[in-house]
Amino acid sequence: MLNDGFVPTVVTYGAIIHAYCLHGMVDEAMKIFTDMSSASKVAPNTVIYNTLIDSLCKNNQVELALSLMDDMKVKGVKPNTTTFNAMFKGLREKNMLDKALKLMDKMTQHACHPDYVSMEILTEWFSAVGETEKLRKFVQGYEVSAAPA
């Protein structure tokens, strides 16, 4: 494309990143993402971040997915419920409860509401670890990561 004088758009990058992720080639997708942000100066959107975060979590790279959420904030890209759900799934697999609680607070701060997927993930996990009270507070819109008084 570049050799033929075509400039890739965010949609073009999104399609390529999605294709790499679908085929389990997350490292390649991350290379495209890095190139997109630096060399091409095309800003990533929420869809691209969601694709990468979901794939990273599915490939047991939860810490890298969390760092992408930090990158979203730096770049002014707002996470949505899909972003948080992908992270919740990844955090559940690694049993990273403290990080999930902090993420739940971020979700509330972003005025991003849990959907049925969020509730399915969190209800199953929090019931298993005896944290249903924190889940109840989250649903009501209260902070859950602070230590109990």
Image: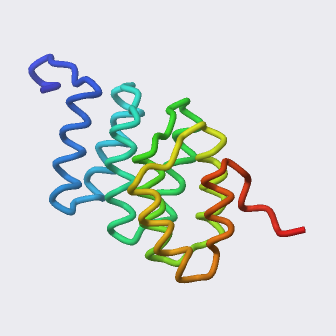
Residue at 16% from the left image edge and 48% from the top image edge: 19
Above-or-below relation of 53 to 16: below
Image spot of residue 45 (x, y percent): 39, 32
Image spot of residue 6 (x, y percent): 15, 18
Left or right of 95 in this view: 131:
right
Left or right of 146 in this view: 11:
left
Image spot of residue 29 (x, y percent): 27, 50
Scheme by which the image is coloured: rainbow
Left or right of 23 in this view: 78:
right
Residue at 41% from the left image edge and 33% from the top image edge: 38
In the rendered image, the residue lying farthest to the left is 4
Picture quadrant of residue 111: top right
Image spot of residue 21 (x, y percent): 23, 55
**For this rendering, which residue is in front, 51 or 27?**
51
Picture quadrant of residue 108: top right
Q: Quadrant of the N terminus?
A: top left
Residue at 48% from the left image edge and 51% from the top image edge: 84
